[in-house]
Amino acid sequence: SGKQGFALAAAAADLGARVTLVTGPVTLADPPGVTTVRVESADEMLAAVTGLLPADIGIFAAAVADWRVARSADEKIKKDPKAGVPRLDLVENPDILKTIAHLKPGRRPALIIGFAAETENVIEHAKRKRKSKGCDWIVANDVSPETGVMGGDRNTVHVITASGVDSWPELNKDSVAERLIAAAAEEIGRLTDKA
Ligand code: C5P
């Protein structure tokens, strides 16, 4: 739905950050105080995000499809009894989070936060995902249909960092956003102090 990502952008702007929100096609209105860039595809999203660097913090909350159709038709595909059912070939989309997280220091945002939507073994899968994506934090949520997280207003998350797992109570997505942005602001303060 984009609700969690939009809430994060709004919360960061409220805290005084300069925020650009890159979003796919969702029905939500631009949050006030945020520059919103609307894209249609994963390739466009990667190009938009790359064009915004350098940035202190990158948060990747978009549910990007792993695959896209290899060729899209310009016209309606007509039924053809001789050709039968058309084949749908897929090609891989770029992994935006992984690409940005593997940029060299300086170009790479100092704090990169990814999301992991899981339906089982949420924490284990998310810990593995933090490593494979190369991000600093992963916010894991259980999106099994019975949780109502997808498209809903509430979320129960586990924040996974290099030092462990912090499990938060069920909160509305605005509160998840406020807490996460407060934690990110603290962390970027620590990281920049060290630098
Ligand atoms: O691999 P999976 O989709 O489970 O990983 C989720 C995380 O990766 C999210 O932060 C999502 O925004 C990001 N992602 C991405 N590009 C993709 C697929 C996922 O940036 N093509």
Image (spheres, rainbow, N blue to C red):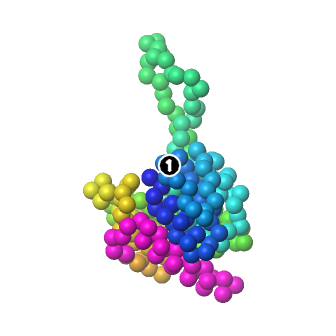
Q: Which residues are magenta?
A: 168-195
Q: Quadrant of residue 120?
A: bottom left
Q: Is residue 191 magenta?
A: yes
Q: How many marks?
A: 1
Query: Which residue is tagged 1?
Result: 26
Q: Position of residue 75 (x, y in %)?
A: 56, 23
Q: Is residue 7 magenta?
A: no
Which amino acid type is shown beneath numbered disc 1?
Val
- Secondary structure mostly taken by the magenta-highlighted segment of the chain: helix
Q: Position of residue 121 (x, y in %)?
A: 34, 64
Furthest residue in direction top, as rendered: 82
Is 195 located above or below residue 99 in the figure? below
Could you tell me if residue 160 is visible in this image? no
Which one is nearer the viewer's eye here, 125 or 11?
11
Which one is nearer the viewer's eye here, 56 or 135?
56
Q: Position of residue 40 (x, y in %)?
A: 58, 44
Q: Quadrant of residue 156?
A: bottom left
Question: For the C terminus, which image quadrant?
Answer: bottom right
Is 35 located above or below residue 179 in the figure? above
The residue that appears at 33% across and 74% down in the rendered structure is 169
The residue that appears at 62% across and 72% down in the rendered structure is 17
The residue that appears at 48% across and 48% down in the rendered structure is 27
Q: What is the secondary structure assignment of the residue under circle 1?
A: loop
